[in-house]
Image (cartoon, rainbow, N blue to C red):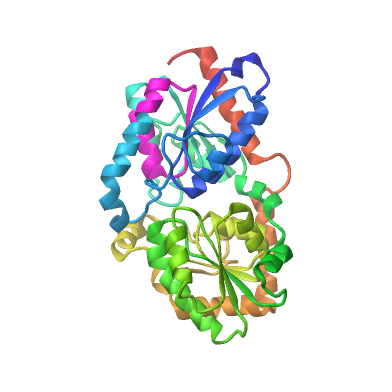
């Protein structure tokens, strides 16, 4: 698809709003360059992963990576200013495609604004919101301003098709990160961690609100674990926008602790860890690729959770559990997310034995269901986007 002359002058705008979308955007940028032989201009909004692929962002994602009422409300003026800035840039430059990635509270505002002002601009939603899991009524609204969806799994594409949104399946791009995972022994050696030392990865999230609500509970759970597991060591992988909070917490950590900020070293830390305590999100899939047994947890502000809970229609929040249709990874959500419960769930994973072995087998099954092997999902997603743009250019404006 990317080798014909019709794609040589393509201008694609990508917009990501937080760390997970930035990772996907970085992978997608690499795929575009492969398919278009470098003859493509990419603009937009992203973070370190997209910048590493050559993006010169309008602004970075620190302003927009927020969640929860207490965090969002004070920053609404700044977020809306960024929405206007990105939308005006799209309207001025008229990209062949505007690709919005994840973060629907931010990216979909931009999409709606652009589509109202210029319906001719093709808008593609990559990593669309999980409206099949909660607030499914949003899909009907999306049909008004989204021209196509690139979904990860067939059941997602089928859902959006029912609402009249053209959809295709790329596969789950997180599996492409499997090649980055490794070097656990080297990580331990470089950090002075004995090969037989019990090592726990602690991952409280990538948003300020997640750190506020989840990190204190995780810290107390580690304190409980340290009382039962001699020599326990912690590693705290983090990302730029919340790294100062993690570094500050590490000063008062109940075990020897290593803070990891560099992306490549982060994957080595996953590989080195014996078990993980993680906020639910993309990181649980990365841990599955690393074959690191885990306990997943999540906490929101009481009001935010009370407002969201009636709209959640799936039995699990961890993707591995969803694809396996059972709770292979323990999930401790909201009131169930207590230090005592977390410590009790992590303990057998650190100590070894049947619980650890069973979860490892389940993680292997989940990774196969993710689609590990074969063509890279980012390549398939980029090819679909190029096909959408080419078809639109041949057909002309609607």
Q: What is the total number of numbered labels drawn onto the structure image?
A: 0
Q: Residue at x 50, y 31 (%)?
A: 166
**Percent x, y of residue 54:** 56, 34
Using the rendered image of the protein, determine whether residue 137 is visible from the camera's viewpoint.
no
The part of the image, by quadrant, that contains residue 301 is bottom left
Looking at the image, residue 36 lies above or below residue 66:
above
Magenta highlight range: 88-113
Most foreground residue, 290 or 237: 237
**Percent x, y of residue 302:** 31, 65
**Percent x, y of residue 396:** 48, 12
361 sits left or right of 93 in the view: right
In the image, is residue 102 part of the stretch drawn in magenta?
yes
**Percent x, y of residue 110:** 37, 34
Most foreground residue, 314 or 370: 370
Using the rendered image of the protein, determine whether residue 27 is visible from the camera's viewpoint.
yes
In the image, is residue 19 part of the stretch drawn in magenta?
no
Looking at the image, residue 148 lies above or below residue 370:
above
Q: Residue at x 31, y 52 (%)?
A: 72
| Majority secondary structure of magenta residues | helix
Q: Residue at x 48, y 77 (%)?
A: 221
Looking at the image, residue 208 lies above or below residue 352:
above
């Amino acid at each position: 698809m990317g080798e014909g002359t019709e794609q040589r002058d393509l201008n694609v705008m990508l917009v990501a709003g937080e760390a997970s979308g930035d990772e996907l955007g970085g992978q997608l940028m690499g795929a575009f360059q492969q398919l278009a032989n470098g003859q493509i201009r990419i603009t937009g909004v992203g973070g370190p992963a997209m910048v590493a692929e050559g993006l010169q962002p309008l602004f970075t994602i620190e302003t927009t990576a927020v969640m929860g009422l207490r965090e969002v409300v004070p920053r609404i003026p700044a977020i809306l200013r960024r929405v206007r800035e990105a939308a005006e840039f799209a309207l001025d430059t008229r990209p062949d495609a505007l690709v919005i990635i994840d973060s629907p509270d931010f990216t979909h505002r931009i999409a709606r604004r652009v589509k109202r002002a210029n319906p001719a601009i093709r808008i593609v939603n990559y990593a669309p919101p999980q409206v099949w899991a909660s607030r499914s009524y949003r899909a009907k609204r999306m049909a008004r301003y989204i021209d196509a969806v690139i979904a990860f799994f067939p059941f997602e594409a089928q859902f959006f098709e029912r609402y009249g949104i053209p959809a295709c399946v790329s596969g789950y791009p997180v599996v492409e990160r499997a090649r980055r995972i490794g070097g656990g022994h080297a990580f331990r050696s470089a950090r002075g961690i004995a090969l037989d030392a019990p090592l726990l990865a602690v991952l409280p999230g990538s948003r300020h609100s997640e750190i506020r609500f989840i990190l204190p509970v995780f810290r107390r759970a580690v304190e409980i674990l340290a009382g039962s597991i001699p020599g326990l060591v912690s590693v705290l992988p983090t990302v730029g926008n919340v790294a100062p909070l993690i570094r500050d917490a590490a000063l008062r950590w109940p075990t020897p602790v290593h803070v990891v900020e560099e992306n490549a070293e982060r994957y080595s830390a996953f590989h080195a860890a014996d078990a993980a305590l993680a906020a639910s999100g993309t990181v649980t899939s990365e841990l599955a690729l690393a074959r690191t047994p885990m306990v997943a947890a999540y906490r929101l502000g009481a009001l935010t959770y009370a407002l969201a809970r009636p709209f959640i229609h799936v039995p699990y929040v961890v993707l591995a559990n969803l694809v396996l249709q059972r709770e292979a990874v323990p999930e401790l959500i909201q009131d169930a997310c207590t230090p005592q419960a977390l410590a009790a769930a992590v303990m057998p994973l650190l100590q070894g034995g049947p619980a650890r072995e069973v979860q490892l087998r389940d993680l292997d099954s989940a990774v196969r269901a993710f689609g590990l092997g074969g063509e890279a999902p980012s390549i398939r997603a980029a090819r679909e986007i190029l096909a959408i743009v080419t078809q639109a250019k041949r057909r002309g404006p609607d």
